[in-house]
Image (cartoon, grey):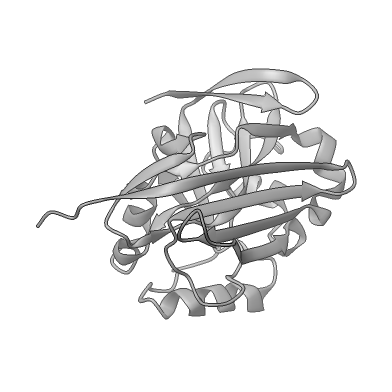
Amino acid sequence: MTHSITFEVAGRGPVSIELRHGVVAGWTARNAEAVAHHIAELEEIGVPPPSSVPLYYHVSAALFSAGTTIETVGNTSSGEAEPLLIDDGERLYLGLGSDHTDRKLETHSVALSKQLCAKPVAPTLWVFDEVEGHLDEIMIRSFVRESEEEAWTAYQEGTLGSIRPLAELIAGSPAASGAKRLQDGTAMMCGTFAVLSGGVRPARFFRMEMVDKQLGRTIEHGYEMKVLPLIA
C-alpha cells in the first residue's frame, strides 16, 4: 500500500513523496548503558527485553501522518520523538517523527504495538547531505501536557550523537539500498531517548522539535491524541 505526504524541504520548497515502506528501528542508543536504561524503563511497564540490538520493525507506510491529530483505542499509548529518514529515490532526507506506541499491547508484542498506532511526522524535511557532517550535534526534544491550559512539561531531550550513526542504521536496515540509501519510498524511524522524569506515560498533547544550531534552523511539530472508547 502506498501513501503520499507533501513535505516542505528547507530551502527547496514542497515535495510530494510516495511512501511504500515503513520501518521503525529500536534499541538504537550508541551507548550500551543508555540501551540498558531504556530497556529497564520499559521493563517497568511490562515490556520484555529485545532479542538483540538494534531491531528493525516493519510497519505499514500508511501509518505515517503529517496531521495534528491521531486517534487511539484506549489511553495506553504514548509518543517518542525520533529522527526520521525518508528516501524518495532521488534524495535522502532527515526529518522528525514520533513512534507513537501502544504500551499495553507492547507488553505482549512490541512488533504488534508498533503497527497499531499512527506515526506522526513533522511536515518539514532537511536534505540529508546538508546535515550529514554535523549530525551528532543535532538536538531533539519533546514535551507533553494533558490540556491546552497546562504548561508544557519537558519529556525527552538528546542529541543524535547518542544514537547509533544513521549511516550504520541505514546499512543494517532491511530497507537498505546501496551505500547510505534506503529503498525508494521508505520512511524509517531511527530510535528515541530516555524519558527525563516520571517514566514512560500517555499524554493528550505531544510536541517535538529538532534543532540544528550550526545551520540555525528548527523543525517543530505537535499533535493531539484523541481516545476512542474501548468497547468490550
- How many numbered circles are shown? 0
Q: Residue furthest right?
A: 214
**Left or right: 18 with respect to 226?**
right
The correct choice, above or below, for 47 with respect to 223 in the image is below
- Which quarter of the rendered picture does the C terminus lie within? bottom left
Q: Nearer the viewer, residue 122 or 149?
A: 149
**Residue 178 visible:** no
Residue appearing at x 56%, y 45% in the figure: 222
**Left or right: 226 with respect to 154?**
left
Q: Position of residue 91 (x, y in %)?
A: 70, 25
Residue appearing at x 40%, y 50% in the figure: 225
The correct choice, above or below, for 227 with respect to 130 in the image is below
Q: Residue furthest left?
A: 232
Q: Position of residue 221 (x, y in %)?
A: 60, 43
**Residue 200 visible:** yes
Q: Position of residue 55 (x, y in %)?
A: 50, 58
Q: Residue furthest front?
A: 149
Residue appearing at x 44%, y 68% in the figure: 201
Q: Position of residue 141 (x, y in %)?
A: 67, 58
The correct choice, above or below, for 226 with respect to 38 in the image is above
- Which quarter of the rendered picture does the N terminus lie within? top left
